[in-house]
Amino acid sequence: MSDVTSSAFQAQASARPGRRDIGIAKRYAAERRFRAYGVAAILTGVFFLAVLLWTVVSNGYTAFLQTTITLPITFSEKVIDPKNERADNPQKLMAANYPLLVRDALIQELGIDANDRAKVKLATDMISASARTQLRDIVVANPQVIGQTLPVAILAEGNIDSANKGQIDLKADEANRKVKNQQLAWMDQLREKGALTKQFNTGLFTFGASSRPEAAGIGVAALGSFYMMLIVLVLALPIGVAASIYLEEFAPKNRFTDLIEVNINNLAAVPSIVYGLLGLAIFINFAGLPRSASLVGGLVLTLMTLPTIIIATRAALKAVPPSIRAAALGLGASKMQTIFHHVLPLAMPGILTGTIIGLAHALGETAPLLLIGMVAFVVDYPGSPLEPSTALPVQIYMWANEAERAFVERTSGAIMVLLVFLIVMNLGAILLRRRFERRW
Amino acid sequence: MTSFKLTLATLVASVAIAGAAAARDQIQISGSSTVLPYAKIVAETFGETFPNFKTPVVESGGTGAGLKEFCKGVGADTIDIANASRKIKDSELDTCKKAGVTEVEEIKIGYDGIVFATDAGNPDLKLTPKDLYLGLAAEIVKDGKLVANPYKKWSEINPSLPDATIAAYIPGEKHGTREVFEEKVLHAGCADTGAEKAIKETIKDEKEQARKCIAVRKDGLAVDIDGDYSETLARIAANKSGIGVFGLSFYENNADKLKVATVNDVVPSTETVASGKYPVSRPLFFYVKKAHLGVIPGLKEYVEFFLDDQMIGPDSPLAAYGLVSAPDAEREAGRKAFADGKTL
């Protein structure tokens, strides 16, 4: 035998002197090509991410600044409460003619004749209509200001804000522009005096929806999203974990459980609008829950997130080695004790990661909310999840459809806020995994 | 785990209570996205002017979807007002009546112009329904016969039009605006070009005749926009020679980016729409459930506030945004009809 093999080997060696061609160069080339494809794939992804972030940030960073006009407002008793009734009837302070105070201060500051009605109108157009509530809140909070003169930073109207940020094409014909030349001159005048300034836009975070861009904010939407996330967390986590523990540890493996598994995987891929239809039919039409309420939104998003959480939890439970279970059972622990004392704690990082990713997904969802009436204009803060509210992505969607120029930057600004929330959640997921994950 | 159980129990309990505590202290409105900006301005000002009432919630979703919600029934768990950019259809009113919404009040808030505009860098554009029909219809008349639309460039239709490939961004079929576009532009053009006559000669079924007359070409040169006007604006920014259909108020807010086309040599403006000289315009409405007046707090006040001249008059915030005010007598009649409780 050995004779045959050695002679065959010798025959081969003599036939091919030097190195055998086993395709090394080709194989290395294939590997280099594959690496190049990989790098190209990553670069493509990074390129589009960079473009996305660049457009959002370059459009949106100005939204965090807001133009204000600081005017010395005289809280004249003659205008606010001419008959001195405020002690008996505090409602009088609510309905007073506050815009007149702003008008008077502005025309004095700009030196406009009060009888030149066209000019006065042009000047008052520079001030946000929200000045009424702004001054009213000051007076109602502290009626002592009546009779005094105080500098108040009043919001500039949205178009003035856009012009101040250079977002309006000043070369366009004056008739086609929302900001007139006279107003631009006044803006320069106020800027020189230091009255017209850009300040940090706290209103973007605290105000509710508004038809005036300068008074619009994501406050109500953020609170609505917070309520919904809370409801999703409180409902989806226990239900999802209970379902997965039963399916993974207790349920017999038969056709019925196979069917359930197929259905869960299927549900994870169902378009989210379907959950909206379901929510409308069950929670609003059948259970009679109020429209536009974040409770209904939370319930719908819970249904949507459940499959994701169940799949992640089952994967985490599967990843716990059987030796742990065997050891616990061997030491006399019951099945319940094995699962709740040993398996579940070890699977927790995986479960939480899955939950956070599911929540992040739910946070960015608009489609299911459309049908349950949460794509809506909501000004007042919801006091409870039963009151109408809206959600962060919905606010972005609604602003993107606005006609006014000043909403463009606010749309991008709100996207940035949403992205920050998502980054924080995903970072949390990664940290949890890093911190607590055990490898075997 | 106990804290979980506790929160779970409270949540379940709150769900159960919610069903019972259905009384609502906030007006709920849904419907047309064209009326939405106006409704938002009124709702916001209403909330500021009447601190004892909450600011109404205004949903957007389209005229059809809004009226469908509206016609679901009477009661605190249904909406109070549906905004509409067209009149309610008889079939919709029937659905309403079957569901118990027997008394519906129609309120006309004013008029809206529909304009054609291109990118601001283009030369002046003069359009007529006839040219638009020849550019956008699926079939046109040639030598007395109906043929598939052969035109690829505007200049082939009328030498005074730009030498550019036809690209029109028109509202999709779910928009109320589409109906006005079909009626005031395509149908008018269909009649002007003689296509209507040719269609009537070849097709017997009346419904089919009407449908043929407003059929838009499907070869990609006329693009349906199902989103809002901001999407049309983005399409025009990408294709400078494209022509888009906008609401007058949207155009006025973006007049530095767009050049508006005249229709039959009339420049669209609030004045020409109000006088009826500009042909492509439509009334805007909202519908109120009479059964909810006096039940939902603030509903009556909201409607009265909306109808007041300080909201829809010629010198009002809605007019400043682009609403074309109805003539004085018509506004007065609207207020009187609401005070009398006139229903459809």
Image (tube, coloured by chain):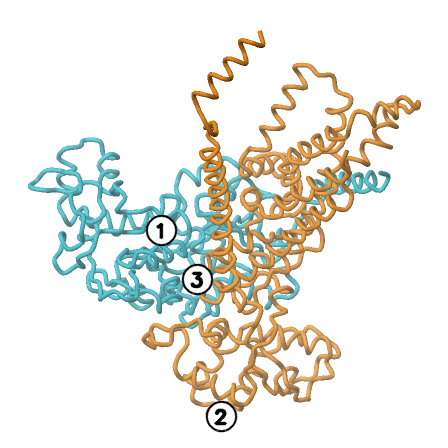
Chain colours: A orange, B cyan
Marks 3 and 1 belong to one chain? no
A392 sits left or right of B213 in the view: right
Marks 2 and 1 belong to one chain? no
Of the residues shown, which amino acid type is indicated by label 1?
Thr
Q: Which residue is mark 3?
A: A403
Q: Is residue A408 above or below residue B193?
A: below
B141 sits left or right of A5 in the view: left
- Viewer-closest of A208 and A173: A173
**Which numbered marker is on residue A96?**
none
Of the residues shown, which amino acid type is indicated by label 3?
Ala
Foreground disc of the pair 3, 1: 3
Marks 3 and 2 belong to one chain? yes
Q: Which residue is mark 1?
A: B177
Q: Which residue is mark 2?
A: A111
Q: Residue at x 60, y 70 (%)?
A: A201
Element at label 1: helix
Q: Is residue B305 visible?
A: no
Marks 3 and 1 close (CB-CB < 8 Å): no
Q: Is residue B128 above or below residue A74?
A: above
B6 sits left or right of B95 in the view: right
Q: Residue at x 68, y 88 (%)?
A: A147
- Viewer-closest of A277 and A362: A362
Marks 2 and 1 close (CB-CB < 8 Å): no
Of the residues shown, which amino acid type is indicated by label 2?
Gly
Q: Residue at x 49, y 64 (%)?
A: A59
The answer to which of marks 3 and 2 sits earlier in the sequence is: 2
